[in-house]
Image: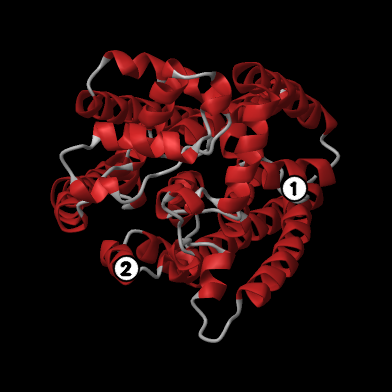
């Protein structure tokens, strides 16, 4: 057993080094983005500090601020990355203004790595897995979306860490606190509201009450920060994307979700994509609800919910695949626990494809990240298959135990 584990750790370490030290730097040199996503957060903090709160969501003001940050790059003068999150999230970025932009970016990347380590430690505590927190951390670094997220300076690690805390609270019987922590994720509401939908269908009212409480708090704080006028500007930005002021608007084919996958189908009109996405999302919500009814452990519920939310979120990016770390660790544990060949055949392919870095590189190069959506769907199927097998094994053991007695 120690030899097998050591060999696997060496493999994960090699893949992590390949992604973090070779593939990602190469992609960064090829893509050469004029301003990474962290620039939008840093810019928003600067705009908020130097202007009235209601001006935070003025796309033209954000564009001018980003031009000052990236004055040396002519491409940054053509478009901006609009900050369109709820303003309470600025609590993370306002302290960064004490540092120059480049230094602040690397400090945030370091903080993101720390958040990933916290999430890995919490997953190790809540999952019945052979993997320690250090091993889960290493596995995560070997997963392409993780270093990709670090490259762009995104805030998905905040969401991941909050989900890990919420799972730990749910595992320890603190349902209201679990919901409260989920409410703190409202800055990316597209990644948390679908999960709350599952809890509502399950009539998990304690979790729902906790979520509603923190959602009310962060919404009130946001209104106090920017006023009703600023919140109205935020809603307008959500509807238009700020494209009318030169802000970058993400194409649908770049989203590895249902919308992105349907948009990659030739001949699909935007109206057809929207209608089919809505219909499929509702069906998947019902399906996820019925699956979580047999999820005895909170970890099973969260694993299903995270696969579900990646697929149905109206705005998903490759770095949001970071949330799949939990179901991935569960599948890796399933490969060790379940020896039957036909079950391993179900678990192994999605794991191999999820860690097959060239697949992501090609999708990014072709601007067809929507084609990655089946990876989340297959991961979901593998998780469901594992849950059913373990439930059947548990029932069989109970029957045998009763017969013996």
- Figure check: 208 above or below 396: above
Residue located beneath label 1 in the image: 401
Q: Is residue 343 visible in the rendered structure shown here?
A: no
Please rate how many residues cluster around mark 1, counting C-alpha atoms within 10 Å: few if below 14, some from 14 to 19, many from 20.
Answer: few
Q: How many marks?
A: 2
From the top left corner, tell me how far across and down residue 142 is, in percent: 28, 48
- Residue 307: name its quadrant: bottom right
Q: Nearer the viewer, residue 318 or 7?
A: 318
The residue at 48%/18% (across/down) is: 91
x and y, in percent, of residue 170 in the image: 67, 28
Quadrant housing the N terminus: top left
Taking the image as drawn, is residue 392 in sight?
Answer: yes
N-terminal-most mark, 2 or 1:
2
Q: Is 374 drawn above or below residue 395 in the view shown? A: below
Can you tell which of label 2 and label 1 is closer to the viewer?
Answer: 2
Q: Which residue is mark 2?
A: 359
Q: Are marks 2 and 1 in contact (CB under 8 Å)?
A: no
Left/right placement of residue 185 relative to residue 105 reads: right
Which mark is drawn over residue 120?
A: none
Q: Secondary structure at mark 1?
A: helix
Which residue is more in the foreground, 220 or 304? 220
| Lateral position of residue 265 relative to residue 363, left or right | right
Mark 2: few/some/many CA within 10 Å (<14, 14-19, 20+):
some
What is the distance, in whole Å, between disc 2 and disc 1 at their CAs? 47 Å
Residue 386 or residue 373, whichever sits in front: 373
Q: For this rendering, which residue is in front, 258 or 350?
A: 258
**Above-or-below relation of 220 to 24:** above
Image quadrant in which the C terminus is located? top right
- The residue lying at 76 percent from left, 45 percent from top is 197
* Image vertical order of residue 324 relative to residue 377, above or below: above
């Amino acid at each position: 057993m120690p030899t097998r584990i050591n060999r696997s750790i060496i493999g994960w370490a090699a893949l992590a080094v390949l992604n973090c030290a070779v593939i990602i730097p190469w992609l960064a040199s090829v893509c050469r983005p004029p301003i990474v996503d962290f620039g939008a957060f840093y810019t928003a903090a600067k705009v908020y500090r130097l202007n009235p709160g209601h001006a935070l969501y003025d796309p033209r003001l954000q564009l001018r601020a980003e031009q000052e940050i990236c004055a040396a790059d002519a491409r940054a003068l053509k478009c901006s990355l609009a900050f369109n999150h709820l303003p309470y999230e600025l609590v993370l970025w306002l302290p960064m203004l004490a540092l120059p932009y480049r230094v602040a970016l690397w400090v945030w990347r370091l903080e993101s790595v720390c958040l990933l380590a916290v999430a890995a430690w919490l997953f190790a505590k809540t999952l019945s897995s052979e993997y320690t927190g250090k091993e889960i951390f290493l596995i995560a670094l070997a997963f392409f979306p993780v270093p990709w997220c670090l490259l762009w300076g995104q805030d998905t690690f905040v969401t991941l860490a909050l989900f890990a805390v919420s799972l730990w609270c749910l595992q320890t019987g603190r349902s209201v606190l679990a919901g409260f922590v989920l409410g703190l994720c409202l800055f990316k509401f597209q990644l948390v509201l679908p999960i709350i939908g599952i809890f509502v269908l399950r009539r998990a009212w304690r979790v729902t009450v906790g979520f509603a409480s923190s959602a009310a708090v962060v919404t009130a704080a946001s209104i106090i920060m920017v006023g009703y006028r600023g919140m109205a500007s935020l809603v307008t930005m959500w509807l238009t994307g700020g494209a009318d002021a030169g802000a970058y608007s993400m194409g649908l084919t770049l989203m590895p979700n249902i919308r992105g996958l349907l948009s990659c189908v030739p001949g699909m009109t935007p109206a057809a994509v929207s209608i089919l996405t809505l219909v499929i999302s509702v069906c998947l919500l019902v399906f996820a609800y019925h699956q979580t009814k047999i999820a005895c452990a909170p970890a099973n519920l969260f694993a299903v919910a995270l696969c579900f939310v990646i697929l149905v979120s109206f705005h998903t990016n490759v770095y949001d695949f970071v949330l799949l770390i939990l179901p991935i660790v569960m599948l890796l544990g399933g490969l060790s626990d379940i020896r039957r060949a036909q079950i391993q055949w179900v678990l192994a392919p999605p794991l191999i494809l999820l860690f097959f870095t060239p697949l992501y590189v090609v999708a990014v190069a072709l601007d067809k990240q929507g084609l990655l959506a089946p990876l989340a769907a297959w991961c979901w199927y593998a998780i469901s298959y594992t849950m059913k097998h373990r439930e059947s094994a548990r029932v069989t053991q109970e029957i045998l135990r009763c017969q013996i007695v």
